[in-house]
Amino acid sequence: MTEQLKAAIDALYPARTIKAHYERYERLTASFRDAFGIDPEGWFSAPGRSEICGNHTDHNMGKVMAAAIDLDVAAAAAKSDDGLIVIASDTFPTVIVDIDDLDPEPDEEGTSTAIVRGVAARMKALGFDIGGFKAFNTTNVLKGSGMSSSAAYEILICTLLSHFYNDGRPDPVEAAKISQYAENVYFGKPSGLMDQTACSVGGFVKIDFKDVKHPVITPVSFNFAATGFDLVITDCRADHADATADYAAIREDMSAVSRMFGKECLREVDEAEFWSSLAEVRKTAGDLGVTRAVHFFEENRTVDRAAAALEKGDFSAFLTEIINSGRSSYMYLQNIYSPSDPRRQALSAALCVSEKLLKGKGAWRVHGGGFGGTIQAFVPKEMTAEYIETMEKLFGEHCCYNVSVRPTGGIRLL
């Protein structure tokens, strides 16, 4: 490994993981050579993301805050002149896409091939140059963990095409929109823009979806590494793969409230009018309609306060807002466990234990969609080992991921 690549790795990843990443990139380089018989021209990385706050607000034109994390999809790659994008992997089947054939393929929905084809198609449609390349990728962004593995992969493909053929363009926000298009139209998942934006922009980012076609994306200036805290995501190993109906119910309950006021979504509803009509709202939209609307209104303010706290460097106030977000999700949004199986409450147990350990010291909340899955905690570094040990006794070895907020999005390392 060259000193230049070592320096690039040093700048990208936290010090506690550097040795592991030296070994990782050496394996990645060797795997590329084995797969293609040539040396790579460059190394690329795109991060996963963590939802910081703004739980279940984006689908009603609300506000969210997310952050890129140091878990990433990394690739060694080289340009080719055969018109083919070929991506091998240590975990997934090899992807081959002919850049002269970029129409959506229904049989590819839900696959890596669909993502590659969709990103290339959208970049070409927007006037960017595209071309062939060979890549070998590896990932430590957990699938189904709420860390946006698909968005990270989309941003990686966009970054490869950007640096090989477009002198580093498009900019991170446009790259996020290109990636969202690929996910919506080709991959077949109707995601919002939060995941791709966090993975593309890097650091903390606040997104306001009031105008869904032109969301306001605001990077939040803050050095998380200097806080003395770790961000720990715990996989409670409560599968939420069957939670589609529960997710849909949240959106429907919020929509029932907005329809009552003749609006398409809660962002368009006047909150004062909502409160003055509470009895009628409850009669029309039910109790969950009331509480989930309350969560929406308050969660938007929480995002604003959390972002303002970071901009001021007031991490204590930020932690308070993270706790507020978590409590609102638990009490009002009610997405911690499925009502169809109330005996299974792994997230409830994880949040309960987290509060016991971290009250007055850190913060904790549900992470992502809920109804199973993961929780998030901001843990003082001197407590991290104790916190992880406690959670892994409950949920099993290697259920905790000590991640860092990554200041950069999709990049070429050299």
Image (cartoon, rainbow, N blue to C red):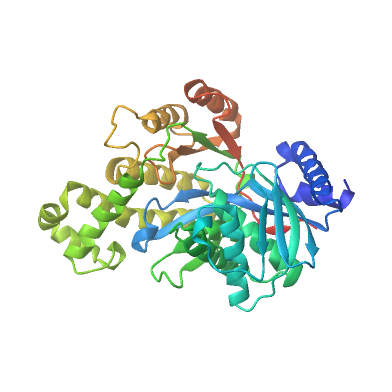
Vertical order, 50 against 358 (above or below): below
Vertical order, 306 against 399 (above or below): below
Q: Nearer the viewer, residue 40 or 209?
A: 40
Would residue 311 be seen by someone viewing this image from the given angle? no
Q: Nearer the viewer, residue 138 or 209?
A: 138
As drawn, the residue found furthest toward the bottom would be 127
**Which quarter shows the N terminus?**
top right
Q: Residue at x 64, y 71 (%)?
A: 170
Vertical order, 148 against 162 (above or below): above
Q: Nearer the viewer, residue 368 or 14?
A: 368
The image quarter in which residue 158 lies: bottom right
As drawn, the residue found furthest toward the right would be 2
Q: Is 330 left, or right, of 155 in this rendering? A: left
The image quarter in which residue 41 lies: bottom right
Q: Position of residue 215 (x, y in %)?
A: 46, 69
Q: Residue at x 54, y 59 (%)?
A: 196
